[in-house]
Image (cartoon, coloured by chain):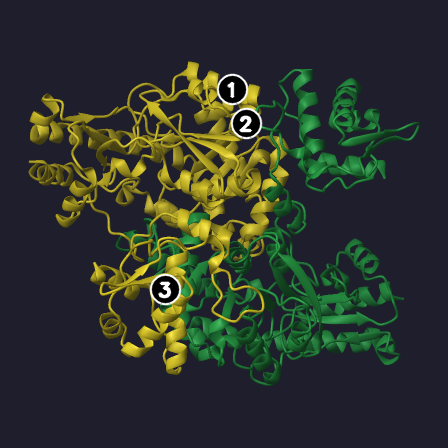
Chain colours: A yellow, B green
Amino acid sequence: MARRAAGRFIGWFRPLRGAGQASLQLQLYAAIRAGVLDGRLPPGERLPSSRALGEDLGLSRNTVLGAYDRLVAEGYLAARAASGVYVAEDVPADLGRASPGQAGPASFSQRGRRLIAAAPELAGHELQAARPFMVGLPALDEFPLATWRRLTNRRLRRSDLALFGSGDAQGLPALRQALAGYLTEARGLNCLADQILVVSGAQQALDLVGRVLLDPGDRVVVEDPGYAGAREALAAVGARIEALPVDAQGLDPEDIARLPTPPMLVAVTPSHQFPLGGTMPLARRLGLLALARDTGCLIVEDDYDCEYRYGTPPLPALQGLDGGERVIYVGTFSKVLFPGLRLGYLVLPPHLVAGFVRAKATADGHAPSLPQAVLADFIAEGHLAQHVRRMRKLYRERQQALLAALQRHCGRWLQNGALRVGPAEAGLHLVAEFTDGRDDRALAAAAAAQGLMVAPLSRYGQRRQLSGLLLGYAAFTPAQIEQAVQTLARLLK
Amino acid sequence: MARRAAGRFIGWFRPLRGAGQASLQLQLYAAIRAGVLDGRLPPGERLPSSRALGEDLGLSRNTVLGAYDRLVAEGYLAARAASGVYVAEDVPADLGRASPGQAGPASFSQRGRRLIAAAPELAGHELQAARPFMVGLPALDEFPLATWRRLTNRRLRRSDLALFGSGDAQGLPALRQALAGYLTEARGLNCLADQILVVSGAQQALDLVGRVLLDPGDRVVVEDPGYAGAREALAAVGARIEALPVDAQGLDPEDIARLPTPPMLVAVTPSHQFPLGGTMPLARRLGLLALARDTGCLIVEDDYDCEYRYGTPPLPALQGLDGGERVIYVGTFSKVLFPGLRLGYLVLPPHLVAGFVRAKATADGHAPSLPQAVLADFIAEGHLAQHVRRMRKLYRERQQALLAALQRHCGRWLQNGALRVGPAEAGLHLVAEFTDGRDDRALAAAAAAQGLMVAPLSRYGQRRQLSGLLLGYAAFTPAQIEQAVQTLARLLK
């Protein structure tokens, strides 16, 4: 236990050398205090002994004791006789601010702590290697790299030097034009290039929605289980999250109508509910739009995985339906092209466009122009449509391979109902739900030890705790899938 | 007046066709309401007549009248007998929220309106063509494009496919390593790669500082005149801005010490004060660090234009001095390489790193990996140092050309003291200050009509209203500079 805490410290605390003992003590004090305030050191967590921590960090034991003493005196830590030092159970919310005029290492603001606490756990600080069944990862090795390189080289020329200067906060006009055409044609959107704001991925889209439209305490409906990135981005700006359960048809607008207070915003994934995979039928879509009209709320439509459907054609996006002027449509190229591109977009109701563009300008100026130009060319010359067609075929084959492997190696749990595989109509992953109360986090940890990367379904739940595994298949060959399912079957036993 | 307002509308309002009159009326209502709430239509502004606006927008007069009537009824506009319709003088702050449960087009939150109001004016929605004397623009046509293309192609290969996946929220390790070496050597920083957070430019660096460290109402000291981007980013998160006057040595720490309440944060440009160009001497640097230690505040050091000094070598950065553990160092590649790259960085005190990385992850995931890899190679292989050396020589020549041209064509104002040229030790622009009370905005407007782009100095002031022009010279040849100064001299007459 103490070792675990010490290990954590060493991960993020690194004393600045070349200063005296007083400074080292202050740095350690500040690091622990920051950990307590932002939740990395949760209440009740035991701290390592001063001797052990001193050894781990290469500090004298007195330096560590000095820092502990001050933290106990200030109420961040509590000393229990004969059993060591713990994080205090009740750290007052405003304890962290150095009051102006009071010396001491500056720390995070209340807003900052909310932002930090809501943030996704950052898995180490490394580029993660692709391992089955990583979720949300497309088949990078099938990406038309030669085409992308050719288009990139065509733009890396003197004649395109304007792309090297300051750009348009709303996004490169050529890209917005290409996107408007693509979205109108492929997704039935009702939009002009002027309604599009180019951002650096769906995460920034959701962050801007939260910053521009919500005040702390405003109510937001999200899906349960649902996409953690949306919930976290909206919680980070102080929204009050109402997680409503989804069924095979996604969110039910009737459930929203029954809330005592209507929300300001409803965030949904109607094309392919994340993570369960349901598709919202037209009746619910129209019901949701009617609810938005009646209550004055806005809908955030994350058109997640809309490109990858394997049977029925996709339903038109909410944004393109009657009443769609209350919809903010969010899209990203992370899964259609590649996550490292960091380009996404919002399609906004006309009266919100100018405000969002200004907010984007304040947040980070504008998206880089050169990749926008390459992407615009990629769309306009038909490469995007072609790539999506190719990948749809490939991913369907890989999905079939996964389903077949599950039948082969996990057939008995499928037959006795202990394992249930979710809808396979769309997307880059399948959900295998455990109906026998199995601990999915323990299984995911065991799988990780075997080199597999399966996300536990319970991670995505709020009030509902479903147990299961998310199995991303898009980035893996049938042979890799076969082998990984064999490993999984051994673990299930 | 009415024409101006109408022109503004047409700039940002575009009715969605294909709907009935009721919908067009609602759209216009929502657009005007949004303009009132976010300050684009200031109190007392006269609106165009319903006839004129209808003609401009291609709407029937009744549609416009219907929208006006509703806005007057709701208190956004006021009708004055026989003189038309005006924006109401006193729009209550919470009028803009559609209360939950109340139908009507949703609008911006209070936070959103603050964010939008603080945002820099977006000059149209176009990439701006380079025109003398655009400020902050490097010589793009001198950028080593062939090298950049070669390095880009080297990374656009199958063996680097990891760069196409999800990246490190803190920034690509190779880039952080290269940066730590560069900053330690070139700027005297005391930093490890682990203290660096890669962001998408200085604007995002300042936005994150505000979001993570400040709560609404927290006091922040900025320079007067000063960099609008910093002031706006910090005001956008609700900070209370204390603008303190700078002299030829930048900000005086004594002025901060005299404030009735010490600030949480002090944002400075010690290398090359923006816009006036002074360099903060060592005594003031140490004074500022002592003040930070005594009061517990943090210093944000925007090491603006540190690479381009033309005489004396640069002073070490605040961050590298004793007490530098209270400094957040901000840097960008917008001026050293090119603005469209959108890569910058923060060097953070160790105890703040983990929190900032999480905030970056929530804000937009991470900076795109591919340009980070190219930049890392560019630095590691010595191209950055070489480019800076070449540009330092070139910019110095261009500065000399500008000074000589000013002597030739504006000599009499320089001699009689009506025009004063600021320090020429560093940077990409010179300041020509008017001491005769001339209206710099009028002159900048007249220059714009002649194809020149000169920023009025008064734009950067808060409580101080200096008059003058910022003359960016880095991107222009001596011949272009000569011609532009001739034009300017004609306008000065």
Q: Is residue B346 visible?
A: yes
SS under mark 2: loop
Query: As shown in the figure, which amino acid type bears the numbered disc 3?
Result: Ile
In the rendering, which numbered label is found on residue A297? 2
Where is residue B316? Give x, y as percent: 52, 81
* Horizontal side of residue A445 vs A231, given as left or right: left
> Which residue is disc 3 drawn over?
A32
Chain on which label 1 sits:
A
Give how far apart the Cα atoms at labels 2 and 3 are.
42 Å
Chain on which label 3 sits:
A
Where is residue A213? Give x, y as percent: 56, 38
Task: Decide: few, some or many residues near mark 1? Use Cα within 10 Å; few <14, some 14-19, many ≥20.
Answer: many
Where is residue A202? Give x, y as percent: 43, 41
Task: Decide: few, some or many residues near mark 3? Use Cα within 10 Å; few <14, some 14-19, many ≥20.
Answer: many
* Horizontal side of residue A431 vs A328, given as left or right: left
Where is residue A38? Give x, y as percent: 40, 55
> Which residue is disc 1 drawn over?
A291
**Front residue of this view, candidates A162 and A293:** A293
Q: Nearer the viewer, mark 3 or mark 1?
A: 3
- Give me the residue at 35% from left, 44% from top: A338
Q: Which of marks 2 and 3 is in front?
A: 3
Give how far apart the Cα atoms at labels 1 and 2 are.
8 Å
Task: Decide: few, some or many residues near mark 2? Use Cα within 10 Å; few <14, some 14-19, many ≥20.
Answer: many
Q: Which quadrant is home to the C terminus of chain B?
A: bottom right
